[in-house]
Amino acid sequence: MSYLELLASSAEGSVGMMSQTLADFSDEDLLVRPCAGANHAAWQLSHLCNAEAHFAPKIGTALVVPAKIVGKGSKQDAANDDPAYWSASKSELLETLTSLRKQSADAIRKLTPDDLAKPSDFGMFPTVAHLVVLYTGHIQMHLGQFQVIRRKLAKPIMF
């Protein structure tokens, strides 16, 4: 297995682990905050979808986020708890993120070592290689936050 295949596979696998973590969440559960100031899962999933599209051009692909989700999950709407605003269902959010991540992983598989060495223009991620590693790490960070929401909802401990 090449290291690019490993990175792409790891990026895809992180979405699978997240889907398992959220499998027993209802759409209403997505709006539960584990504590004041923490983001609910609807915000986080929307944020992940939009971040995926934001980073994609640097790995050679363009992704389209559905209108129901595009632009959501920003600092500006972090305090918003209005269910009408967060109208995308859990299945819509997970299907969107899974599709976007599949497209990103396919683009990662097509990168070359020279591509990985190119600058990324994303601050703390100086090269495309650093950005590719972020693909797995970003979801893993949110997985930890979803686990805290699971505790608040008294759902079984998974991992």
Image: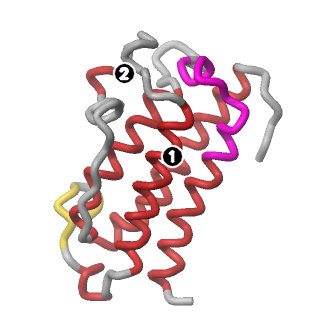
Residue labelled with disc 1: 95
The residue at 37%/21% (across/down) is 78
Is residue 134 positioned above or below 115 on the image? above
CA gap between label 1 and label 2 equals: 22 Å
**Residue 88 in the image, given as x and y percentages of width and height:** 44, 28
Q: Tell me if residue 29 is in the magenta stretch.
A: yes
**Residue 131 versus residue 109 in the image, above or below:** above
* Residue at the image point whose x is 28% and y is 55% from the top: 63
Q: Dots 1 and 2: beta carbons under 8 Å?
A: no
* Location of mark 2 (residue): 78
Q: Amino acid at mark 2?
A: Ala
The image position of residue 37, as x and y in percent, is 46, 17
Residue at the extreme right: 156
Left or right, 40 with respect to 49, comes to right
Q: Amino acid at mark 1?
A: Glu
Q: Relative to the observer, which residue lies in front, 145 or 105?
A: 105
Please tell me whether mark 1 sits on a helix, a strand or a loop.
Answer: helix
Rendered image quadrant of residue 48? top left
